[in-house]
Image (cartoon, rainbow, N blue to C red):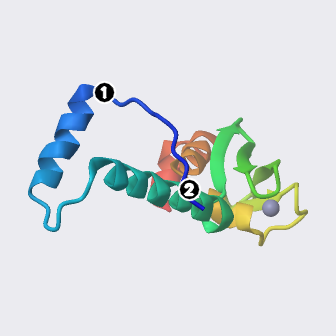
Amino acid sequence: MPKEYADLQISREIYEKIREKLEKSRPRVPISSYVEHILMERLEMDEALQKHGPFLSYSGNNENTIFVNDWKAGRIAAVRVQLDEKGEYHLFCELDQSDKCLHVGFVTALPEFYAVLKERLGPAKFSRK
Ligand SMILES: [Zn+2]
C-alpha cells in the first residue's frame, strides 16, 4: 500500500535553515524526509519520557508542607516537614503514609525544601548544619 501524505506548512526561515543544512549532506536527503525523521524522533522521545522519565515535579509549598506532583499516580503528594527539639528535620509523605517513599527522596533534592527549613529554623541555626 502506498504511503499517504498530509500537507503541512513551516516558516520560510526554518525551511531555509534546513535546506542549507541538508545541502551539505551526502547522500542528499529530501527536506520532507528529514523533517519527518526529526518529528518521529521527537514523538518517540516524548513517549519514552512519559513512560519511564521523571514523573515528579515540585508543585508548591506552605511553611509545613511541600507538594509534589506525581504524574504517574495522577495525584499530588503532600510531604510534611517536621522539626524536632534538636532542630532536626523529619519528612513524612501523606500520600504513602511513609517517610521512605519516592516523594520524600524527591523533596530532599529541592531547593524549595531548604528554603522552608531555613524559614522554620532561622538563618543562624540553619547555617550551623
Ligand atoms: Zn510518597
Q: Nearer the viewer, residue 32 or 63?
A: 32
Of labels 2 and 1, earlier in sequence is 1
71, above or below 115, in the image: below
Check residue 11 in the rendering and tell me which mark sits there, or answer none: 1
Instruction: Locate residue 119, reporting x and y percent.
Output: 59, 39
Q: On the rendered image, what quadrant is the N terminus found in?
A: bottom right
Query: Which callout, 2 or 1, points to the residue nearer the camera?
Result: 1
Work out whether 12 lies above or below 35.
above
Residue farthest to the right, as pictured: 97
Q: Residue furthest left?
A: 24
Q: Which residue is at 63% across, 50% downward? A: 57
What's the residue at 74%, 53% (across, down)?
Answer: 70
Label 2 is placed on what type of residue? Asp
The reply to whether residue 15 is visible in this rendering is yes
Look at the numbered discs 2 and 1 and tell me whether their residues touch, using CB distance below 8 Å.
Answer: no
Residue 25 position in % (x across, y down): 14, 61
- The residue positioned 72% from the left and 67% from the top of the image is 102
Residue at the image position 82 percent from the left and 50 percent from the top: 74
The residue at which mark 2 appears reads as: 46
